Amino acid sequence: MAGWIISILLPLAVGGLAGFLSMNSMSVYQDLVQPALAPPSWLFGIVWTVLYILMGVASYLVFRSDAAPQEKKTALTLYAVQLFLNFCWPLLFFRMQNYLGAFLLLVLLILVLIATISRFAAISKPAAWLLVPYLLWTLFAGYLNFSIWLLNR
């Protein structure tokens, strides 16, 4: 039971810390020239909370699987790398207002996330599917980030 709770709390804590470190981020976001399809700022907190919970459940399924230890280690290492990149993005985008750098980081995050999903799929198909909404949201975030960079230079 403790592993289940830790698996869910870890990404929530990472996201919460990134949010705390990039305080006033929604005021920065609202002041930018917005691209078409830009969602309202209140939606981000809801979406990220759901995505972090899904990420935690996915990591728990991999951790508790019967897969070989090395397979799990590789998959969970990729998971940790993408979580670290996820943590860095709001700092780069909101705090440093480096929109191009944040976009390039998102491209890297997407590549690592695809690798994570691939490794998770080899261990647990449900775990991999739980990360698909995160990938889709991150691709959408890439569109928003790139558009914001173009519109606000």
Image (cartoon, rainbow, N blue to C red):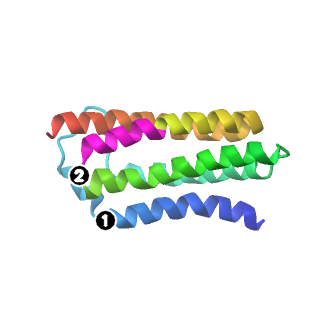
Going by the numbered disc 2, the residue's amino acid type is Gln
Give the magenta part as a residue range.
Answer: 98-109
The label number, if any, that marks residue 138 in the structure image: none
Write down the residue under mark 1: 23
Q: Residue at x 50, y 34 (%)?
A: 111
Q: CA distance from mark 1 to mark 2?
A: 13 Å
Magenta segment: does it hold 114? no
Structural crowding at the residue carrying mark 2, measured as other residues with C-alpha within 10 Å and reported as few (<14), some (14–19) or many (≥20): some
The foreground one among 4 and 106 is 106
Is residue 6 visible from the viewing direction of this image? yes
Q: Kindly identify the residue that appears in the image at 25 percent across and 56 percent down.
A: 96
The percent position of residue 32, horizontal first and vertical second, equals 18, 46
Residue 25 position within the rendered picture, expressed as x and y whole percent measured from the top left: 29, 58
Whether residue 43 is situated above or below residue 144 in the rendered picture: below
- Upstream in the sequence, badge 1 or badge 2? 1
Magenta-drawn stretch contains 106? yes
- Tell me the quadrant of the picture where the C terminus can be found: top left
Residue 27 in percent (x, y) is at 23, 58
User: Secondary structure of the magenta portion, mostly?
Assistant: helix
| Residue 97 badge | 2
